Amino acid sequence: MSTPTPASILLIYTGGTIGMIQNPETGALTNFNFDRLLQHVPEIKHFNLDIFAYAFEPPIDSSDMNPDSWSELVSIIYSNYERYDGFVILHGTDTMAFTASALSFMLEGLMKPVILTGSQLPIGALRTDGKENLLTAIEIAAAKNPDGTPIVPEVCVFFHEKLMRGNRTTKISAENFDAFESNNYPILAHSGIEINYNKHFIKPYDPNSVLVPHYAMDSNIIIFSLFPGIGPNIVTKILQNTEIKGIIFRTFGSGNAPQSPWLTEALTEATRAGKVIVNITQCSTGSVKMHLYETGCQLLDAGIISGNDSTVEAALTKLMYLLGRGLTPDAIRSEMKRSIAGEITL
Ligand code: ASP
């Protein structure tokens, strides 16, 4: 009987706290190189896996991530797609949810695991959470069903015992090890003594799916958040800005806004001018339902579309992706209402 070939994993290191070290002079955390990071995890050699590494040069704090870095990740994954069974991306936690969301749209037809992880403490620190996160992320990226298909053929974030659909995640803590939440979708797996997969909620494997990479993201978008007392002077000017093509409009509760005529007029004018305005609640759980209150109905009349139960990260990157594809405002509005990569519950 022949021994099965070990799964092969590509580990992509972008930067973030996991690979940082304290500068003895300033006390600030700065990046150190990937080989030194791996020296802190000798356990990696005990996996019966072929693990290869690719490092961003130089590694970056995730505050410096941008659409070009996402394109670079898409290009690395696309050009190595046939060679590897799964991908693990080491990433700073601050913008990990944005990157995970962006990749879920940019990697159309993905049928292999792409698992993002990082840590709250550097991997060299005594109480680091980085080792556990990294080792489990690798195990998940290599996990297969008895028929050889990947268990998790989608973009995910693994952090502190939880595997989550990437475009459902949000960073919720700047200090707890349990730093990410998937507020509107069940977790895909929990890791304790064993990794228990919640298979019902994981994207089903489709053998006929073909990976189509998308590289263009249009970031002519703003996130506009309401607050009680908001006035017309600045807002009207921003809504009239011709450079802006899309607006993530953060509203109250189930998608409500003040009934001030100036606001309704400015929003109506903006949608008529071709801007796509997406209503996302300021609440961290639940969904936009604009028909529930009069304060929401006026937004429907103004041509604003519901972002449903999407995270801000997913709505923003989805809009960037759709604008990047050069679709018309109406086509973008209808795509925003559809679930492209499991980012909204319909
Ligand atoms: N500032 C860091 C980053 O996002 C924080 C972290 O990795 O936890 O790159």
Image (cartoon, helix red, strand yellow):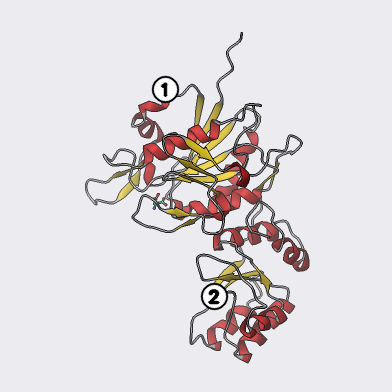
Query: Is 230 on the left or on the right of 267, as rendered?
Result: left
Front one among 32 and 256: 256
Query: In this rendering, does residue 54 appear at all?
Result: no
Q: Please state the horizontal and vertical placement of residue 249, each as a whole percent of the image.
A: 59, 73
Q: Please state the horizontal and vertical placement of residue 198, each as a whole percent of the image.
A: 56, 43
Residue furthest top in the image: 1
Q: Residues within 10 Å of mark 1 (few under 14, many from 20)?
A: few
Q: Considering only vertical position in the picture, is 4 above or below 334? A: above
Q: Residues within 10 Å of mark 2 (few under 14, many from 20)?
A: some
Q: Considering only vertical position in the picture, is 222 above or below 176? A: below
Q: Which of marks 1 and 2 is in front?
A: 2
Residue 137 disc label: none
Q: Please state the horizontal and vertical placement of residue 342, each as a whole percent of the image.
A: 65, 52
Which residue is at 45% across, 34% downward? 194
Q: Please state the horizontal and vertical placement of residue 326, each as a whole percent of the image.
A: 74, 59
* Quadrant of the frame with the N terminus: top right
Which residue is at 60% across, 41% downward? 199
Where, by quadrant of the figure, is residue 296 drawn? Answer: bottom right
Q: Which amino acid lies under the numbered mark 2 shown in the image of this protein? A: Gly
Dot 2 corresponds to which residue? 253
Dot 1 corresponds to which residue? 46
